Amino acid sequence: MWTFIARRLLQSIVVIFGVTLISFVALQIGGDPTYLFVSERATEEEIAMVREALGFDRPLHVQYLTYLANVVQGEFGNSLSYRQPAMEIVLGALPATIELTIFAMTFAIALAIPLGVFAALYRGTPVDGGIMTVAMFGQSVPGFWLGIMMILFFGLSLGWFPISGHVPFLMPLLEGDFATAFANLPSTLYYLVMPGIAVSFYSLSRNARLVRSSMLEVLGQDYVRTARSKGLNERTVVVHHALRNAWLPVVTMIGLEFGFLLGGVVVIETVFSYPGIGRLVFNAINQRDIPVVQAAVIVLSVVFIALNLIVDLVYARIDPRVKL
Amino acid sequence: MTDVPNDGLRRLAADNRSEFSRELRRAGRSMVAAKWPLLALLILFVVAFVAIFGPMISPMDPNRQNIMLRLAEPLAEARRGGTFWLGSDALGRDVLSRLLYGARISLLVGVCAIAVGGTIGVTAGLVSGYFGGWIDDVIMRLGDIQLAFPFILLAIMFLVVLGPGVINLILVLGIGQWVTYARIVRGQTLSLREKEYVEAARALGDSTTSIIFRTILPNIVAPLTVIASFNVASVILAEAALSFLGLGVPPSVPTWGSMLAESREQLIANKWWLAIFPGLAIVLTVLSFNIMGDWLRDFLDPRLKERR
């Protein structure tokens, strides 16, 4: 178990290293990156000054090592449009994004497992057909369009949910203000409903299909037949014998799913004017605020890698066969 | 006497041909039986037709602005007796015409990105699986690193620096897909490498390139078509998302994603037609590719269907 944890930790470090390398290459790939940091009207002298100040005149390997050292210290330079350290801005937006991601993930899993199990148990019936048709659609609908449709229908026409905004929960919690945090919680959730569903619909659909096929496979196994022939009731067979094994592949998927969710979050936050990293990245893209984009991408990657690590450790815990 | 082997070869070739047409007929029957794939194929034909002949069938110039006729509702009258079948946008441009032109970018980017990603991935997978050793390690670890990194973030980072454009979009989306192909192809190659007919080719003195591309590759094409089908679907979704973020193609080229981005500003005013039609176009196209992928998988591997 400990060697497994050590190995996974080491792997994560290698991956983060790879991420920094890729983001460094991305910065260099368009030619002299100095031009990304100066205004269009900058004179030659100003450009030369910025080039020297940012170190873009030095050899590439020196630049990368400096870059790496800066990344490790969370130093991405000042945002070009806010005149504040880019990292500070990104970290300020992180809690809102984490709230949205966790909400979406919870929603996706909480629905995908029962839906997949039902579809498998009622295989070939209209219940199965209905669930699988919706899941097929879910995998074909762009999350941000779903968000737009929900805004039009549930937000504007029916007025059931707010069409934009966010009430912070994690932020006051982290600052130690528990009273505010828990007083905010109901509104936090209320504001999360529409963006959360828009973010999670794709994952929900894919996981429902995954649970179904995994469940069908397990239901055909000998030990399930044995459990049935022992006279156990169907509920016990399904929940304790089948589902326990069927959901292992699902747990593996969950780790990767975070990546998809984070991707969706970037776009859907923009749709709902949700003040997280996604909207920050969107605005930074439009203002060509490179330090903020870089800081945001690195922070989200580290979050993603950390979540993956946690999922793997949980997996090792629930599946005794993993003793690598 | 000398005619005999020749004759045999000819018969073999004829057999092969008839087997191919038999397979094709079997595919047709399975498609008709399953119904949905047939509809999906029809939709894809329509989308492809629109993508190719868009400029000829589009009722108006997709970039022609008309401030007097801005935000016209669907079926509203346009100039000179024309009709805005699907309404007009905030600059008075015809939504239907823009939609028809948009099919081009979606399909072009989808198919080309798969070609790029598929070529890199298949080559990497073949090399990795056939040679093994350190080269296999390097390729697969590179893939692991890429997968450990949310793809859309990677795309954003490169496109912000490179700037928008069809070629950049295709390259970034294509490179984002190679790992999937590499992994599948590597696995297949590993098992095929030990097969007798590969050994036979080796014994006959075929070159390594010939063994890899002529003997092994044709045997792994089938599963690749399934992945490619699903892959086109997800690439079209990614393209729409990137266009929505303003990282797609330049603003003068209409795309479904950028149309949705523009619709956002008119949302509060409840100009629903600007948002619904481009979205439906994406959903129908992506759904069709997904249905085709599902059907292809069942068709190529009937054992799976029994489990499903």
Image (spheres, rainbow, N blue to C red):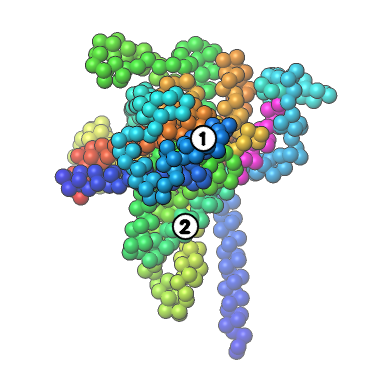
Residue B37 percent across, percent down from the top left: 56, 43
Residue B25 seen by the camera: yes
Vertical arrangement, residue A305 with respect to residue B180, above or below: above
In-front residue for pair B12/B188: B188
Q: Which residue lies at the image location 20% right of the left edge and 37% below the top edge?
A: A231
In-front residue for pair A218/A176: A176
Q: Quadrant of the N terminus of chain A?
A: top left
Which element carries disc 1, helix, strand or loop? Answer: helix
Q: Which residue is mark 2?
A: B122
Extreme residue in the right direction: B80
Q: Does the magenta run of residues contain B301? A: no
Q: Residues within 10 Å of mark 1 (few under 14, many from 20)?
A: few
Q: Does the magenta run of residues contain B103? A: yes
Q: Quadrant of residue A275?
A: top left
Q: Chain of mark 2?
A: B
Left or right of B55, for residue B135: left
Magenta residues, start to end: B93-108
In-front residue for pair A59/A283: A59
Q: Which residue is mark 1?
A: A46
